[in-house]
Image (tube, grey):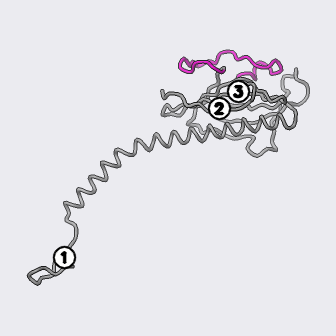
Amino acid sequence: MRLARNGCIRKSGFTLIELMVVLVLIGIMTAMIIPEMKGSYEDALLRSNSRELVNVLNLAYSRAVTINQPHRVRLDRSAGRYLIERRVGQANRENSFTPVKDIPGGEGRIDPRISIEFRIQGEDFSNASDQNPPLVSRDDLPPQDRVETIAFYPDGTADAREILLEDRAGFRLALRINPTTARVEIVELERK
């Protein structure tokens, strides 16, 4: 409250029109910001899932070298699951890999909003089809396991693969496994 010049007490505050103008401005700003935030959320989800896959690939590599036994990461694209497996028995047996259950982070899920696609390293992602081309792999992997697995070997090498991750908004990342060093590189691709 203020004292006016004529001696009357005057109340200060906002008028209804001023409040409505502020609310309209807040509404306009919100309408402009929300679509941008959605893209940021989708992008963050994609990056989080890619880091999770990089961690499991590095874990499989580390185990293969440490234990001196081939390991692989199996990705089930339809279920959105991954797990680390290790070699048991002879190399020419069809089911010579078994899941490793005693490693924290050795298995998990990829968010269902993220699609997964395997490619041979260097292949163009723009002409993706529903079927994957035949992949060249080490001879000791059975044919049905060559597409959805990435093997890591005791000598520090790995299968050359690229894994394409894409969210519903079209953001894409490629995880490229270097066959010589078994290191994973994350490459950001153009949005579809």
Q: At which x and y percent is residue 190? A: 50, 27
Residue 138 falls in image quadrant: top right
Residue 102 in the image: state x and y as whole percent.
Answer: 82, 44
Crowd rating for badge 1 (residues with CA inside 10 Å; few <14, some 14–19, many 20+): few
Q: Please report the bounds of the magenta region as a residue range.
A: 121-148
Image x and y of residue 145, in percent = 76, 23
In space, the residues marked 1 and 2 are separated at their CA atoms by 65 Å
Q: Quadrant of the N terminus?
A: bottom left
What is the three-letter code of the residue carrying label 2? Answer: Glu
Q: Badge 3: how crowded within 10 Å, few (<14), some, or many (20+)?
A: some
In primary-sequence order, the first of circles 1 and 3 is 1
Find disc 2 in the rendering and name its residue.
185
Residue 178's disc number = 3
Based on the picture, tell me whether residue 132 belongs to the magenta stretch. yes
In this image, 19 relative to 79: left or right? left
Tag of residue 11? 1
Secondary structure under the numbered disc 3 in the rendered image: loop
State yes or no: discs 3 and 2 in contact (Cβ < 8 Å): yes
Residue 143 inside the magenta-drawn segment: yes
The relative height of residue 6 versus residue 26 in the rendered view (above or below) is: below
* Vertical order, 38 against 75 (above or below): below
